[in-house]
Image (cartoon, rainbow, N blue to C red):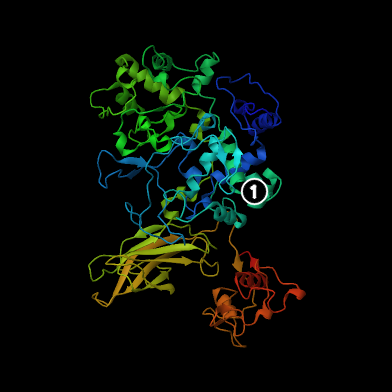
């Protein structure tokens, strides 16, 4: 197949079957012409990554899976919503170069709470332990398939380098693949500080695809019904179940190349369909491309972009050097990529910094209408001062941009622009929230509880943090099924104890990583978490944080509860007396097993397995064959033994 493959002609997608039929012809190398819509050029597809349906559906699942983030709260689609122009549907403020609310503020995307290499919460210079906000507005994924470079500054190049091998995976035309590798490692968007693609791919091996999502579109639900694991999905797309960064990039890019918004009124108008556009929109189209400096000088052709980089004078270049950060050329300072305007009427924010909230404001800025924001001259594009729109054409241009360029399928989020409901999109009552309360410290402030994690039953790393306490204090995390009274819960139990870390007043922090054991945390129940800190200088000798209200839920694969009676330890990790009974294998059994005499002891040379011949598993958690149990053959008691032990005693069952 040639480097520029035939277009994925989603214009024929009157239903999924027709669309998939068109896709099959494209992937087989056949040239398919459309009698319906012919306004867009062919989608460029690199020869190294031909489109297949198996890759498309894998890419769609990956694009919407929040488990690609270390917090479990962010997917690619969280910031790129089809019904919001392929961009951000939420509004959040980054204070920009200064820490104050001023004219240099940026409307970016909500990300994650900053976390360190151990995925424990740490403070960020601007946002502290609050969710970070990106320093640029999210760009639209619509028409990204045609872009020779990606991101506002074009840092994602057409040559795609495999981040795990360092080898060239796509010689040219791979900007989408290159772009897809950035957000999962960005510490403000999706990643802890020491994350890498080896860790991400390893995490996906055992992840349950879209476990936190609901209302899955039928193509996603059908794919997962027959292939419910990522190794199975990757095997269908690539021939075997290996999960690599390259394959993730190929799948994500393939999905995005099938998102072609070519059924807007402008497309039907170009075909001569009567009534496709109103008279006002037709007038706006004419004014948009009028002679002289006009909108179409940059937003040209069927793509409505020339892919150029320009400085518009929205803010001084020194605040964000833009393209110069990529090229190193001072002549590129303050320049940003010209986006396509297809589906622009669905967006909530405009420009690289989200400066404007309406298309009317954008047109006013270009036209220098009275009251428009200042335009900064440094390196400003020479076309800008010459733009002049007659007052009689202003509203028609706005009408044209808002309505004539909008594909109704994108607005309605129907196939192929459909999506699941993410955890972050659940109703507020179904997500973690924070309740005022606590007990003030001797310094008369309330420490803060931190939760940027998903409370699904079975989560073995549900992170609950504590901030703003003096270091070297004993902090205990309590949990209750009852709401607080007077700002304080009555803990049913304490689930974590640690001495706070830090240096200086209010610098102490702690992160607890909890296992939401299905024996202890029930689907649909709400739990209240609060930190209690020993503080002799406080009036009561005790300080308490505010409260996290945590509604626990079963993921899309359901809940599983322990049911094996083969316990060897009580809930505190002590061996059971012969007459006792217990309630299933749990952390206590792990502890009892691990501390059993003869399995693991401390020596002058450090931890070693005194009873190496008693190993029950190899390092991967598989039972050892008889000839492998001799002393010295294995590496002592380790995670593999834990896993083997747990698998031998723990039998998942519904309920």
What x and y, as percent, mark residue 439?
A: 28, 69
Q: Nearer the viewer, residue 153 or 129?
A: 153
Q: Which residue does the image show at 42% across and 35% down from the upper left?
A: 327
Q: Is residue 159 left or right of residue 369?
A: right
Q: Can residue 216 be seen in this view?
A: no
Q: Which residue does the image show at 36% across and 70% down from the upper left?
A: 500
What x and y, as percent, mark residue 87?
A: 45, 37
Image: 341 above or below 481: above
Image: 17 above or below 422: above
For label 1, the crowd category at 10 Å Cα-Cα, with few meaning under 14, some 14 to 19 and many 20 or more, is many
Q: In this view, does 340 lie to the left or right of 167?
A: left
Of the 4 image quadrants, the one containing the N terminus is: top right
Of the 4 image quadrants, the one containing the C terminus is: bottom right
What x and y, as percent, mark residue 267?
A: 53, 20
Q: Which residue lies furthest to the front in this view?
A: 329
Q: Which residue matches tag 1?
A: 224
Q: Is residue 313 left or right of residue 588?
A: left
Q: Residue furthest right?
A: 627
Q: Which residue does the image show at 51% across and 40% down from the upper left?
A: 179
At mark 1, the secondary structure is: helix
């Amino acid at each position: 197949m040639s480097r520029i493959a035939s277009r994925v002609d989603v214009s024929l997608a009157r239903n999924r079957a027709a669309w998939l039929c068109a896709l099959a012809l494209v992937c087989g190398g056949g040239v398919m012409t459309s009698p319906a819509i012919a306004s867009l050029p062919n989608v460029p597809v690199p020869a190294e990554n031909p489109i297949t349906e198996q890759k498309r559906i894998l890419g769609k699942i990956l694009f919407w899976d929040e488990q690609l983030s270390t917090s479990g709260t962010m997917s690619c689609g969280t910031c790129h919503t089809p019904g919001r122009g392929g961009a951000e549907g939420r509004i959040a403020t980054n204070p920009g170069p200064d820490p104050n609310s001023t004219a240099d503020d940026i409307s970016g995307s909500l990300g994650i709470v900053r976390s360190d290499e151990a995925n424990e919460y740490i403070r960020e210079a601007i946002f502290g332990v609050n969710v970070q906000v990106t320093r640029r507005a999210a760009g639209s994924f619509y028409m990204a398939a045609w872009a020779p470079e990606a991101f506002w500054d074009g840092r994602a190049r057409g040559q795609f380098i495999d981040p795990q091998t360092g080898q060239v995976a796509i010689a040219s035309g791979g900007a989408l693949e290159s772009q897809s590798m950035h957000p999962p490692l960005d510490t403000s968007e999706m990643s802890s500080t020491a994350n890498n693609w080896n860790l991400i791919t390893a995490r996906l091996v055992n992840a349950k695809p879209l476990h936190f999502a609901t209302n899955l579109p039928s193509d996603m639900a059908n794919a997962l019904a027959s292939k419910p694991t990522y190794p199975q999905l990757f095997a269908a797309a690539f021939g075997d179940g290996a999960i690599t960064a390259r394959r993730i990039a190929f799948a994500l890019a393939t999905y995005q190349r099938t998102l072609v918004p070519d059924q807007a009124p402008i497309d039907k108008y170009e075909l001569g369909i009567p009534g496709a556009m109103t008279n006002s929109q037709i007038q706006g189209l004419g004014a948009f491309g009028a002679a002289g400096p006009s909108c179409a000088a940059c937003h040209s052709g069927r793509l409505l972009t020339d892919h150029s980089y320009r400085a518009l004078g929205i803010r001084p270049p020194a605040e964000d050097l833009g393209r110069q950060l990529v090229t190193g050329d001072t002549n590129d300072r303050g320049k940003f990529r010209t986006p396509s305007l297809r589906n622009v009427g669905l967006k909530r924010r405009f420009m690289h910094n989200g400066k404007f909230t309406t298309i009317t404001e954008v047109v006013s800025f270009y036209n220098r209408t009275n009251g428009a924001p200042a335009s900064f001259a440094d390196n400003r594009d020479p076309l800008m001062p010459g733009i002049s729109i007659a007052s009689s054409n202003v509203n028609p241009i706005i009408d044209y941009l808002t309505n004539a360029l909008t594909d109704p399928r994108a607005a309605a989020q129907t196939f192929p622009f459909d999506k699941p409901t993410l955890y972050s999109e659940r109703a507020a009552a179904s997500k973690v929230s924070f309740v005022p309360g606590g007990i003030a410290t001797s310094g008369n402030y309330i420490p803060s509880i931190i939760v940027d994690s998903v409370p699904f039953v079975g989560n073995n790393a549900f992170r609950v943090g504590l901030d703003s306490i003096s270091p070297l204090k004993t902090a205990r995390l309590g949990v209750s099924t009852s709401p607080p009274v007077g700002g304080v819960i009555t803990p049913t139990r304490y689930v974590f104890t640690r001495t706070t870390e830090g240096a200086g007043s209010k610098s102490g922090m702690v992160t607890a990583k909890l296992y939401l054991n299905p024996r202890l945390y029930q689907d649909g129940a709400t739990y209240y978490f609060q930190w209690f800190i020993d503080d002799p200088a406080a009036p009561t000798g005790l300080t308490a944080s505010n409260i996290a209200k945590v509604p626990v839920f079963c993921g899309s694969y359901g809940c599983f509860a322990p049911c094996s009676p083969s316990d060897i330890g009580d809930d505190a990790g002590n061996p059971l007396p012969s007459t006792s009974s217990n309630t299933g294998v749990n952390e206590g059994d792990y502890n009892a097993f691990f501390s059993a005499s003869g399995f693991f002891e401390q020596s002058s040379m450090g931890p070693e397995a005194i009873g190496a011949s008693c190993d029950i598993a190899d390092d991967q958690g598989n039972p050892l064959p008889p000839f492998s149990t001799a002393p010295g053959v294995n590496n002592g008691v380790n995670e593999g033994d834990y896993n083997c032990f747990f698998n031998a005693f723990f039998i998942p069952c519904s309920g």
